[in-house]
Amino acid sequence: MATDPAAVPGTEFSPGLPVGLASDEGEAPPGIGPYQLAWRRLRRNRVALAFGGLFLLMVVLCLLAPVYAHDIAHTGPNDPHITDVIKINGKPTNVVSTLGIPIGPTWHGRFFLGADATGRDIAVRLLYGGRNSLQIGAEATLLTILLATIFGIIAGYFRGVADGLISRAFDLIWAYPVYLLGIALGVSLQVGGLDLGLFKIQGNTLILTALIIGFIYVPYVGKPVRGQVLGLREREFIDAARQQGLGSLRIMFGELLPNVASTIIVFIPLILANAVLTEAGLSFLGAGVHDPNPSWGTMITDGIKLVPGAIHLVLVPGLMLVLTVLGINVFGDGVRDALDPRAKVRIEH
């Protein structure tokens, strides 16, 4: 998390400079922006960039799922081929044997990674499942960051009754373990969906899972933002803004928001990784994505039923999940180090 610039020797605080991005005069050329400085630091962290590239590769592969399904596998993610027979090395082979065991990887266009118990192409479902998992993770992250930023700034700036109500709401959500609260909300909303008055969200849609996960993680970002705003509201530049007659909204989102931006940026990859992992966990437990929508969590659930006869059904989606979350986390650590004003990275002019 960002550090108060006043506590870092050799740094000078500026109202227009986000907290956590203050830099030493001798560390950067004159006139360089804080985010440009952070980018120069990040460029020199080759490990973080490599894992960020790994995550981008996963995203691109999942986005190309329709192309792979239509032009290479020639099947959709939910098309069953339980009675089909394909040729492997010139030998006719049942996609699903009479004992109910699906074929393993063929390493060819069709059934590249094998099939599941109903004859659906694992590679196609893997890519479509990744699209769903990443979509839910991105939507949940956007909701978390948006709500946490708004309520965290409001609570820290106004204090008093507003702070008391928002903080107690944060504490209430925080008190429940993530998966326990996610299961409770997921199961309870599966039957009737979520009625928001103007529109209703069905219980088997991806957006409902994203809303549940996004809601769960709000206090994990909102509480640090609130704590930082509590300290910033007493600074001289906020007093100067009040003396100039600026309104509360202008001060909150024109003065305070830029100064907590670095903290919010650091939380984005952290929440994204946790959202993707949480979606997989909830889907695995039956409280997230449901058939016919694929996801890495539901694929692991289906694969466990056929272990050890078809262990690839568990290993393949599990490996994709691990690589995606690992890529986000390592890249997120690099972003945090780049935004850390205490990081002493030599900058070439």
Image (spheres, grey):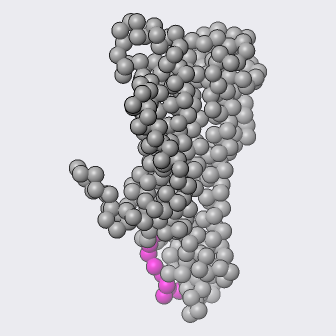
Position of the C terminus by quadrant: top right
How many discs appear? 0
Q: Position of residue 122 (x, y in %)?
A: 55, 71
Q: Residue 199 placed where, x, y %? A: 25, 53
State which quadrant residue 263 falls in: top right
How far across and down, in percent of the image, does residue 343 sit? Answer: 73, 25
Task: Please name whichever residue, 169 or 37, is drawn nearer the observer in this view of the structure.
Answer: 169
Q: Residue at x 53, y 68 (%)?
A: 285
Quadrant where the image shows the N terminus: top right
Name which residue lies at 46% across and 41% down.
Answer: 168
Q: How far across and how far down the image is residue 66, in percent?
A: 46, 60
Q: Residue at x 59, y 80 (%)?
A: 305
Note whether residue 60 is visible.
Answer: no
Q: Chief secondary structure of the magenta span?
A: loop
Q: Is residue 83 magenta?
A: yes
Magenta region: which residues? 76-87
Q: Is residue 7 at all visible to an observer of this figure?
A: yes
**Up-down relation of residue 316 to residue 97 (above or below):** above
Q: Is residue 9 left or right of residue 313?
A: right
